[in-house]
Amino acid sequence: MTIQQNALEKINGNKKVSVPSTMKGLKSKEVKDIFEAYRDQIAEAVPKHLTPDRVIQIATTLIARTPELAECSSSSLLGAVIQSSILGFELVPVLGLAYLVPFNNKKTGKREVQFIIGYKGLVDLARRSDKIKTIYAQAVYEHDTFSYEYGLEPNLIHKPHLGERGNFTFAYAVATFINGGFAFEVMSKSDIDKVKKSSQAGDSKYSPWNSGYYDEMAKKTVIRRLSKLLPMNVELAANIESDSKVIKTDSFTNNEIDLNLTEEVDYTFEEETEQKTDHFADVSI
């Protein structure tokens, strides 16, 4: 049984709450009542450091502060909040864990929510692998000392300039493994901008790309590319792949996301140009 079916039974039973196609024009109390209908599913999903009350309050406040979210389909909005709960992310933009971005979906002709995992959220997910020791990303600027090489002896050197660092030029991500070895990925600004351009939500003023988090999104982008090469279990990999999707309430079964029931709206360029890289060093996993 999907979360949507389960919740609708509750709505038609004791809850007596109907879910409109969008939440536009609803008061905060009415929005909260809709999320309350999903309380049981949220409670089953959230880790110990979160509570259903906290998730519902943050979601209600976020919608009140971003009216365009209320114009999106309720199913995509609820789905994004549920997935964020499953991942244990608070939807507070300054935390950099995850974002909800309203956009006009060219495929459906509807206004929907794109669920975007932030840089810190992606790092948090990658660190949950029991085979990864450290993982991080850095932005590089034109006055920094920066060089890298692949091949039989991969090497990367980055010395940030102590004064004015100039314009953004590269981002790179590095992972080290519990049993030794490392892997890294480098992307230029032009490569990163192509990824941004491929996003249907990339032009939205609410996208973290355009609301003061470009460097963070650049670091997230290169970590996401690196993550495709890292050792992870199926569940963790699926959670990372939920990034930048349209996720609806019927995308879940038993609080696990089914990627076949989500819609890909981002990273088209990255998927089409994925490289078979060989820049691992002393990796035995």
Image: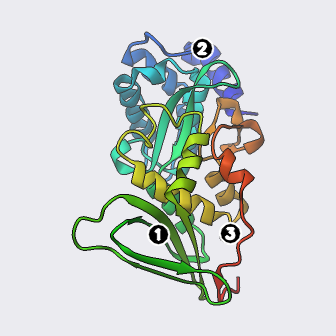
Q: Nearer the viewer, residue 74 or 245?
A: 245
Q: Amino acid at mark 3?
A: Leu
Q: Residue 237: in sight, yes or no?
A: yes
Name the N-terminal-most of marks 1 and 3: 1
What percent of the width, then of the height, locates residue 282?
65, 89
Q: Which residue is mark 3?
A: 229
* Residue sitting farthest toward the left: 163
The quadrant where residue 45 appears: top right
Q: Which residue is mark 1?
A: 136
Q: Nearer the viewer, residue 148 or 36?
A: 148
* Nearer the camera: disc 2 or disc 3: 3
Q: Amino acid at mark 1?
A: Tyr
Secondary element under disc 1, as helix, strand or loop, is strand
Q: Which residue is mark 2?
A: 21
Whether residue 257 sits left or right of residue 182 in the image: it is: right
- Residue for point 50% across, 62% down: 123
Q: Nearer the viewer, residue 40 or 66?
A: 66
**Quadrant holding the N terminus:** top right
What percent of the width, then of the height, locates residue 81?
52, 36
- Residue for point 35% across, 29% down: 61
- Mark 1 Cα shell of 10 Å, populated few (<14), some (14-19), many (≥20): many
Whether residue 268 sits left or right of residue 197 in the image: it is: right
What percent of the width, then of the height, locates residue 166?
31, 61
Name the N-terminal-most of marks 2 and 3: 2
- Mark number displayed over residue 222: none
Secondary element under disc 2, as helix, strand or loop, is loop
